[in-house]
């Protein structure tokens, strides 16, 4: 063989080796996602009601976002925003009634076309079957906590067990398969918990049963000094929580009761038996009844979160023990925030902080400095373009979100100063009025365009959003500036004209 031919063969071999090496070095993404996880129930954010040691690991070993928000605070629309990088009016899913158009571009489809194995397990909630995934097992609709059904390409299956643990099992099986195949992968592990009706798993039934939680100081909010819309909702703990459906009094009214095995029923009933007996004998009314409902709600809600945190720990441990930790981006978030008694509420939907703000943690060893804190304004439409840039893939020009990778790596970047929000589901569950608005780091302007009401909040002076200063002379310049910014953002995002709706 001549030297020239030998040299050519060597170059080809070297290039092939580099290609193989580059393929092996493509980072995996494990996207862990829960439902209705309030920021104020995560210890990394300073929770005073619970501990989340495994989620906190992601904060300690990666980045924590303190000002991350959703574009539309409700389950299905938030998920559509994340998949597409588009606001609700652009991806076509404005509320929980709409069906997701699976033919549109999503970030899993782009990863799939670029050699990634993709999978989603757990809550999907978009009414059409997943597209862009090599493997999927999803709940019909909201799904159940106990012995849930899963829709698969082969049909529907009911599987015995607790939903959080089952979904984790499927996620771990998928990771193992990809490790053996030596393929880069995207895993979306999406828990039902801690969504209503907050049914704790067998291991967590008594975790908080005898704990008394501090009450938020706005538990008995009278909704004064704001628009009339705040008082017209149907999401108050005292008035709107259902004794059987939500609070397990009687325990047989639990929505999962008929799905449970006999052993599951026995354990479930025994956990609530004494507390329910004491409650019935107390014959509570008025504020005392509200306080009891709040405590029961918190006990069950936080027990569901404990299951999520423990199972996140299972996945993190598996990645570490199997040599995948260093080459895997791990993300934790939830579809929106939630009310834990603030303003007397449960649920979400509003542009107020508790429901507007989303948890977000990202760990990427060797790229993101441990203990990084991001305090810039980010939004769930940013997830898709960020994931794509992390993998050196081009985001479609039509995506409206911005990659926040420069924020994670410390590169200088001019970043946005405001966010656009729009909630559409009225009339509908919980009767929260339609509204749109603009948020900056300090201020928030909200337009309830169907009723003609406006609200303006100064988050620095009024972080609990108890007093609207809309129309206050002291804030006239701020109000004018935010009204102009709302117009600018609507033009930027090609948002609908709601002036006559």
Image (tube, rainbow, N blue to C red):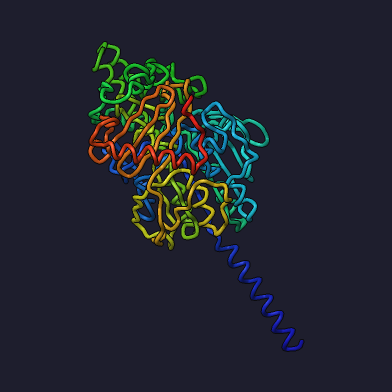
Quarter containing the N terminus: bottom right
Query: Looking at the image, which is closer to me, 129 or 298?
Result: 129
- Above or below 489: residue 197: above
- Above or below 469: residue 318: below
Q: Splitting the image into 4 quarters, where does residue 154 fall?
A: top right
For image coordinates 55% across by 26% down, the residue present is: 97
The extreme right residue here reads 1
Q: Position of residue 65 (x, y in %)?
A: 37, 48
- Above or below 216: residue 4: below
Q: Position of residue 271 (x, y in %)?
A: 36, 24
Q: Splitting the image into 4 quarters, where does residue 484 fall?
A: top left
Query: Looking at the image, which is closer to me, 94 or 251?
Result: 94
Q: Splitting the image into 4 quarters, where does residue 98 fall?
A: top right
Examine the rendering and report whether any part of residue 42 can be seen: yes
Q: Position of residue 179 (x, y in %)?
A: 57, 55
Q: Position of residue 244 (x, y in %)?
A: 40, 16
Query: Looking at the image, which is closer to me, 264 or 259?
Result: 259
């Amino acid at each position: 063989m001549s030297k020239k031919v030998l040299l050519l063969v060597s170059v080809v071999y070297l290039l092939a080796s580099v290609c193989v090496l580059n393929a092996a070095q493509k980072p995996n993404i494990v996207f862990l996602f829960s439902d209705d996880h309030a920021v104020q129930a995560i210890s990394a954010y300073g929770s005073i009601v619970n501990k989340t040691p495994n989620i906190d690991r992601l904060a300690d070993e990666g980045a924590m976002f303190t000002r991350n928000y959703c574009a539309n605070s409700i389950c299905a629309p938030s998920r559509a925003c994340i998949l597409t990088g588009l606001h609700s009016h652009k991806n076509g899913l404005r509320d929980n009634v709409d069906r997701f158009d699976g033919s549109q571009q999503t970030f899993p489809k782009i990863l799939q076309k670029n050699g990634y194995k993709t999978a989603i397990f757990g809550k999907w909630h978009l009414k059409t079957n997943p597209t862009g995934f090599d493997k999927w097992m999803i709940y019909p609709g909201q799904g159940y906590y106990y012995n849930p059904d899963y829709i698969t390409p082969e049909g529907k299956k009911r599987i015995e067990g607790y939903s959080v643990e089952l979904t984790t099992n499927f996620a771990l099986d998928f990771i193992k398969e990809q490790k053996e195949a030596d393929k880069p992968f995207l895993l979306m592990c999406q828990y039902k918990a801690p969504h209503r009706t907050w049914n704790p798993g067998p291991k967590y039934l008594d975790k908080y049963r005898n704990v008394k939680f501090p009450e938020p100081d706005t538990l008995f909010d009278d909704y004064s000094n704001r628009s009339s819309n705040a008082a017209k909702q149907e999401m108050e703990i005292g008035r709107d929580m259902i004794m059987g459906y939500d609070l397990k009094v009687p325990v047989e009214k639990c929505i999962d009761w008929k799905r449970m095995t006999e052993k599951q029923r026995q354990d479930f009933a025994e956990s609530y038996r004494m507390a329910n007996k004491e409650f019935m004998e107390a014959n509570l009314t008025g504020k005392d009844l509200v306080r009891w409902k709040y405590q029961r709600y918190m006990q069950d809600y936080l027990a569901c979160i404990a299951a999520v945190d423990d199972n996140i720990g299972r996945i993190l441990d598996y990645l570490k023990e199997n040599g995948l930790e260093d080459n895997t981006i791990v993300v934790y978030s939830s579809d929106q925030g939630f009310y834990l008694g603030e303003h007397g509420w449960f649920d979400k939907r509003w542009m107020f902080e508790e429901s507007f703000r989303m948890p977000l943690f990202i760990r990427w060893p060797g790229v993101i400095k441990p203990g990084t804190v991001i305090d810039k304004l980010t939004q769930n439409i940013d997830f898709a373009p960020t994931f794509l840039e992390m993998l050196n893939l081009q985001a479609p020009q039509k995506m409206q979100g911005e990659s926040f990778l420069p924020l994670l790596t410390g590169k200088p970047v001019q970043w946005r100063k405001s966010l656009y929000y729009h909630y559409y589901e009225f009339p509908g569950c919980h009767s929260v009025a339609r509204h749109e608005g603009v948020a900056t780091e300090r201020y928030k302007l909200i337009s309830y365009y169907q009723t003609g009401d406006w609200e303006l909040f100064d988050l620095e002076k009024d972080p609990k959003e108890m007093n609207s200063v809309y129309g206050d002379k002291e804030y006239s310049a701020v109000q004018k500036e935010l009204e102009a910014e709302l117009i600018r953002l609507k033009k930027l995002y090609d948002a609908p004209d709601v002036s006559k709706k």
